[in-house]
Amino acid sequence: VAARTFEVGDGLPGQAWMSREPLWRTDPGAFASAVALPLQADGETVGVVRLFSRVRRDPEPGLVRPFQTIGAHIGQFMHRRDAGSRRGADAP
């Protein structure tokens, strides 16, 4: 899957970036449902992942907390990976 860019506040990913909360939409184009999951590291949004379903799924409030936890774990992983890459680039 190719990475795409978006403007903060634009579309579902941009809105999730701004709100720092998982956002759920039904009927986004060719898919029946989608969730935009902001990735957090050290209190900052570092990315957004979109999950799609071909089956229409209504928003489930009980999934917000698990989605936030998943987003934090992925965001922290990305943060550690980037920090390790920077340290490796600085080494002689």
Image: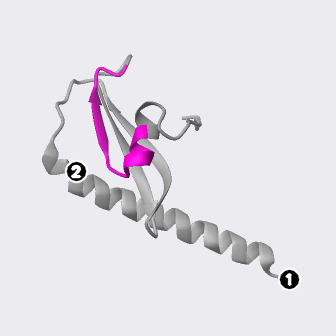
The magenta-colored residue range is 15-28
How many numbered tags mark residues here? 2
Cα distance in 3D space between marks 1 and 2 = 44 Å
- Mark 2: amino acid: Val
Up the image or down, 19 lies above or below 30; here it is below
The percent coordinates of residue 48 (x first, y second) are: 46, 46
Q: Secondary structure at mark 1?
A: loop
Q: At x 68% / y 69%, what residue is drawn?
A: 85
The percent coordinates of residue 91 (x first, y second) are: 80, 81
Mark 1 crowdedness (10 Å alpha carbons): few <14, some 14-19, many ≥20: few
Q: Give me the disc on residue 2.
A: none
Q: Quadrant of residue 52?
A: top left
Up the image or down, 82 lies above or below 3; here it is below
Q: Locate residue 51 relative to residue 55 in the image: left or right.
A: right
Q: Secondary structure at mark 2?
A: helix
The percent coordinates of residue 44 (x first, y second) are: 47, 62
- Mark 1: amino acid: Pro
Given residues 10 and 38, the one toward you in this image is 10
Identify the residue under disc 2: 64
Magenta region includes residue 24:
yes
